[in-house]
Image (cartoon, coloured by chain):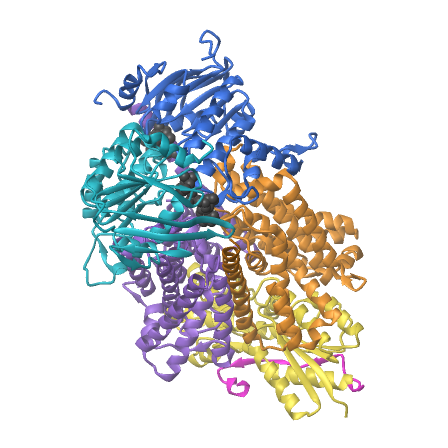
Chain colours: A yellow, B blue, C cyan, D orange, E purple
Amino acid sequence: EDNVKLGFITKFPVPFFATMEDAAKAYAAANPGVEIIYGQGTSATDIEGQIAQIESMVTQGVQGIALTPVDPTVAPALDKAISQGVKIVLMDNSIPDWKGLTSLATTDNYAAGVIAGQYLKSVLKAGDTLGILEGVPGVPALDDRVNGMLEGLKGVEVKVVGRAGTNCTEELGINVAQDLLTANPDLKAIYAACGPPAAGAAQAIKNAGIASDAIVLVGFDFCCGEAEALTAGIEDATVAQFPAKMAELGVDALVKAIRGDEVPLLIDSGAALVTKDTMSQFQ
Amino acid sequence: MTAAASASPVLAVRNAEKRFGAVHALKGVSLEAYRGEVLALLGDNGAGKSTLVKCISGVHGLDGGEIELDGQRTAIHNPAAARSAGIETVYQDLALFDNLTPAQNFYCGRELSFPSWLPRGMRLLRRRAMDQEAAAVIERLKVRLPRFDAPVALMSGGQRQAIAVARATVFARKVVMLDEPTAALGLREARKVLDLIAQLRDEGNAVILITHNMEHVVELADRAVVLRQGRKVGELKPSKANQHELVSLIVGAEA
Amino acid sequence: MTAAASASPVLAVRNAEKRFGAVHALKGVSLEAYRGEVLALLGDNGAGKSTLVKCISGVHGLDGGEIELDGQRTAIHNPAAARSAGIETVYQDLALFDNLTPAQNFYCGRELSFPSWLPRGMRLLRRRAMDQEAAAVIERLKVRLPRFDAPVALMSGGQRQAIAVARATVFARKVVMLDEPTAALGLREARKVLDLIAQLRDEGNAVILITHNMEHVVELADRAVVLRQGRKVGELKPSKANQHELVSLIVGAEA
Amino acid sequence: MILILLVVGISLATPNFLKPVNLGNILAQSAVIAIVAIGQHLVILTRGIDLSVGANLALATVIGGLVYRLADSGPLVMIAMLTAGGLVGAVNGIVYVFGRLPHPFIITLATLSIARGLALEFAIGHTTMRGMPSEIAFIGGGATFGIPNSFFVVFGVAALVLLMARAMVWGRWIYAVGGKPEAAVQMGIPVKWVLVSVYVISGLCAGVGAIVLAGRTEAASPLYGNLLELDTIAAVIIGGASFLGGRGHIGHALVGAVMIGVIRNALNLLNVDVFFQMIAIGAIIVLAVEADVLRNHLEARVRVMQSGRAS
Amino acid sequence: MILILLVVGISLATPNFLKPVNLGNILAQSAVIAIVAIGQHLVILTRGIDLSVGANLALATVIGGLVYRLADSGPLVMIAMLTAGGLVGAVNGIVYVFGRLPHPFIITLATLSIARGLALEFAIGHTTMRGMPSEIAFIGGGATFGIPNSFFVVFGVAALVLLMARAMVWGRWIYAVGGKPEAAVQMGIPVKWVLVSVYVISGLCAGVGAIVLAGRTEAASPLYGNLLELDTIAAVIIGGASFLGGRGHIGHALVGAVMIGVIRNALNLLNVDVFFQMIAIGAIIVLAVEADVLRNHLEARVRVMQSGRAS
Ligand SMILES: Nc1ncnc2c1ncn2[C@@H]1O[C@H](COP(=O)(O)OP(=O)(O)OP(=O)(O)O)[C@@H](O)[C@H]1O
Ligand SMILES: Nc1ncnc2c1ncn2[C@@H]1O[C@H](COP(=O)(O)OP(=O)(O)OP(=O)(O)O)[C@@H](O)[C@H]1O
Ligand SMILES: [Mg+2]
Ligand SMILES: [Mg+2]
């Protein structure tokens, strides 16, 4: 078979994307003839950095790029790449209304949010209060996690008593959670749209000396200290994606497409609810 | 010398009051300056001379009293107003821009520019004309500058002072105030500045000169006003004869 | 007056050379200063006087030539070295800290502190002692300051200069250089500074005085060294009689 | 100078670097930083700082994006972006000057936060809005004779500002205000208006940057321009301007911007791992500035020695 | 002053604000900013700026986290964090001073990038490492008599630095260097070492901040301290220090830090919408500073009028 050269671009340095990169490296090791070069941005808002990476990969003559688009606005750069014969596979999240892609390997964040919402619905009752630690306001994938959760929660009249951005950092997570707890001593549940603020919220609950079963904490990502919080019983559930699977499926689809095989437009790598009892399967 | 005391004053200050927090720097000072006359403003350190100059030039606002120009009560809100009313000032701290060349310093705030129908800031600079004219003035004052196109930052104290004095002469139209213009000057340069002051006077300006050098006062001044601790303590016509009287006015009774 | 020219010089500069880029500021200048003597350093603006002072005080390094202290060739790498070798300087720009009070300015870089076994920066300040001693010196100089505990930023030109001169007197031990110390001073303050210079001399310091005031030179200086455009053009004993000769040395042949 | 050394070194290390398409990429990638750095440069000339440029740019794209939804007109959208940028700049300048704030840091930090908040608030769905008029896409993403159009925009803005700063009275005043603000007051320069004007121009440059970035991405986003303030200040300082005001040349700010672009591009081409990229960028920037310092120092030395021999 | 007004206003708007537990929260939330702002304050006193504090703090927690994995010893981990912070500070100071850089902006921007890169590189799994010795958890997260322990840390650091700045010769030198650097050289002050020392202390403060934050979260993370540089500089400037150096008081920097904490806390308590929070933070900060400016202005006026009547 022909040798292929691919680019693999992830968003920014968190374990989720590191896991994806590792999976891609494993794929390249297992498939001689597949050469992959890697790139990563610096933050959740590093749009210009990602565009620069796409451009320089094209310069280096890759035949395809698998990437986790940090923002829909990288599309023109991808279009330019496609015009040079480069195939594009998106991973993790899509670019709405963009038709250039060969395939998309993803967890549907909205659907995953619904999973979290349904879990909350199962433990909360009408009149309970909920605080939301958002991710980075304006980042669609993260906003979907919140909107999906609210969708999943429909049916019980839960009162949302606070929403604040955390930039997906633990520091802001702990501060905002602390303030939520103060403003609403009767708070029943906290939902965090990414891992670090979930861990921060767990720490805030612990520091406030609130009994771990007095409050429901649901996170997202299953990373960055959530495992410890689940083990300790402070965090009750989180939503895990399967980054390794996502990367492997994405790269595989790209290689196949370059070699001329037919690949499906949508590849779902799935998401699942993780609780203390089920967490061992996800580690 | 050429002054006509009977003529009306071009500049008059009446009962000027100025406070800086607890410091009462000017306590009801009045003075008058006439065209074609050199008025010496004397006083020991901290007497309030520079403060008075800055009030007239619009840097400070007066807390009380008023300023008349050509008999008209005038409010001088800022230095731009003073300059366009024809008052030029050589400040004690020189007010030079270290990052600009002598010519640029000369015309700063008064740039030669065109076209005149544009607002001032948007006009184009006439660099050549400014360079030439500034060079001519410097030449006239016989100031030796190491380089004419280098910023003034590295020039010697005297060179800097000469530039500041030269600047005021270019724009003088009515009143010129010089706050210790010869303090850092060498013999030759000091002489040039004195000549220049005489020339400014002869051109019909009212010159207000602050200095601690009695020889210069006796040589040039038509009248002298003496301040002590913010108060006007005397006014007389200086001469070799009454130099001692002047000195005791300045330093106070105890001297 | 009390100088013994036969004694060996406490400070000797030999063939000092200094360039600033294209400007050749010192061209092989030599001079000697003796204990108990006032040496006037004269020259027109830009002659290189301040540059020479700054080379001796360690602000600039020499490009050529050498400096001897008490007959020992000494490299003065920085101002701290000069100060600890006993050389105090009053700079033309005063080197005052606008944000500090007079007392703090006095002792800056030389703070009274304890315990002495700690490295200097880590010792504790003896504020009271510094405040009192500084106040005493100011008192002695009869400088009128509006407030003693306010930063010097807002003081008048003369007040600032008086503080800078007073500072040098506190630490004088061997050589004191004063770069135009009376330039901005009123009559009374100038007199005090001259008295102080005499006192520094009588205490056995070698005093180097830069000034443009010939009266002061004639009154105080035991010897005068004249610079012109970076070169030493003469050295003589100033007196009323040869004041004219001195002036023509300073301004050059054409005058 | 240092830029040239850098370019030579990189081209030896990675052959792709000198490909025309890559050089075009670098220019396009540096364009936004360069344009905004020009405004930042003027602000720094007056001893100020403008932290709001990045958020301002984002807000301008969002406003432009909203206008585009009302009318698919390139000129209208551009005017909207420029107006938005200029307005934020005017707020900075006016509050700083007439509010007598001790330093522009606070107000521009505040407008950074406010503009970012407004951009998120206004953006439809609080997120990226795709689509831009074709004129804007042409300016930001197109190329003429293989040279990205954004390069011409940089060139145009630089030439215009250079002309204003060098040939106009106003430019002289900027240097005077930066050199010695008190003296500028004493000389009767309308210092307050000069200060306001540089913030307005910095805002307008952010508006131009918004046009270029929106054109390049064919979208508007409230997240654009993150940390652009640091990049532009770095470009200006690398270019040799001083925070003490009154010193520096616009050309140098452009060199600084391109230098940052070249370093980032080279690290991408060399496939350097992300974490190491961050380390390398920091190190290279310091080395570049340090090299410049040493060069000036050596040059001064050599000059002294040469003139010594000559005389 | 303004802080008090702010507090009164907020407590009227939200009754929860004055609850002891919330006041404790504010202190804990402001602690890191306050500690790091103390170091930043010294740097700004000397006309400098330290952009690296946030990344430095992150690196320090990561180093501490690594040491914790080797030995569960509170003192050892603390020493590791302080050493890491101090070292980065030393690099800043030494490169700036002995590299004769024109301004510390460049080098601290570089170490910001480098320290962040190193933190990511070193962190196990490139991410948050949970777990801290109990001593550190006690310092950062515990409370004594209902007062968060981190408050005592802030207090201790502030008292120590205040003592050093006011009572020690070194402190006088800092003000001298900030007031007029050339004069400081002329007076024989070891200006270079004074400059190095403030960057080292700023680094050490980042190290202390790392201890508090790691203790509060019981974790180490390479992502900590994002934008902390802007928060601390804002705290210092809100507190009234000047970028022109030599002016300002450490107490004011603390007030500035608490002010930022109070504003953020109040907006959370009031359940203000995310985007509007950003807008409100910006607006309130400017208003607070502006109120202070006006107050000073009025006070000066009143004083002139009173002394006018008295005489
Ligand atoms: N901006 C200011 N704020 C506070 N006090 C001031 C200010 N300017 C001057 N002063 C004080 O006002 C008094 C008069 O100062 P001024 O500068 O007018 O004296 P002067 O007569 O010019 O003295 P000199 O001959 O030394 O220049 C001094 O006590 C000075 O400290
Ligand atoms: N740091 C510097 N860099 C470049 N040139 C300098 C520097 N310092 C002084 N010069 C130049 O060196 C020459 C001598 O200057 P210097 O200050 O020594 O003169 P001076 O004799 O003290 O004059 P004045 O009586 O005016 O103070 C001048 O031409 C000056 O412009
Ligand atoms: Mg005065
Ligand atoms: Mg001199």
Quadrant position of the C terminus of chain B in the picture:
top left
The spot of residue D144 in percent (x, y) is 80, 60
Residue closest to the far top: B6
The residue drawn where x is 69% and y is 82% is A250
Q: Nearer the viewer, residue A168 or D204?
A: D204
Asked if one can make out residue C150 in the rendered structure from this viewpoint, the answer is no
Residue E185 as seen in the image, left or right of residue C169: right
Q: Nearer the viewer, residue E300 or D259?
A: D259
- In this rendering, the answer to whether E213 lies above or below D14 is above
Q: Does the magenta stretch include residue E58?
A: no
The residue drawn where x is 47% and y is 70% is E115
The quadrant where ligand 2 appears is top left
- In this rendering, the answer to whether C107 lies above or below A177 is above
Residue C126 as seen in the image, left or right of residue E248: left
Quadrant position of the N terminus of chain B in the picture:
top left
Asked if one can make out residue B101 in the rendered structure from this viewpoint, the answer is yes
The residue drawn where x is 62% and y is 39% is D170
Which residues lie in the magenta part? Answer: A259-283
The spot of residue B55 in percent (x, y) is 43, 26
Residue D134 as seen in the image, left or right of residue E73: right
- In this rendering, the answer to whether C40 lies above or below A38 is above
Q: In which quarter of the image is residue A39?
A: bottom right
The spot of residue D264 in percent (x, y) is 62, 69
Q: Nearer the viewer, residue B5 or E148?
A: B5
Q: Quadrant of residue C96?
A: top left
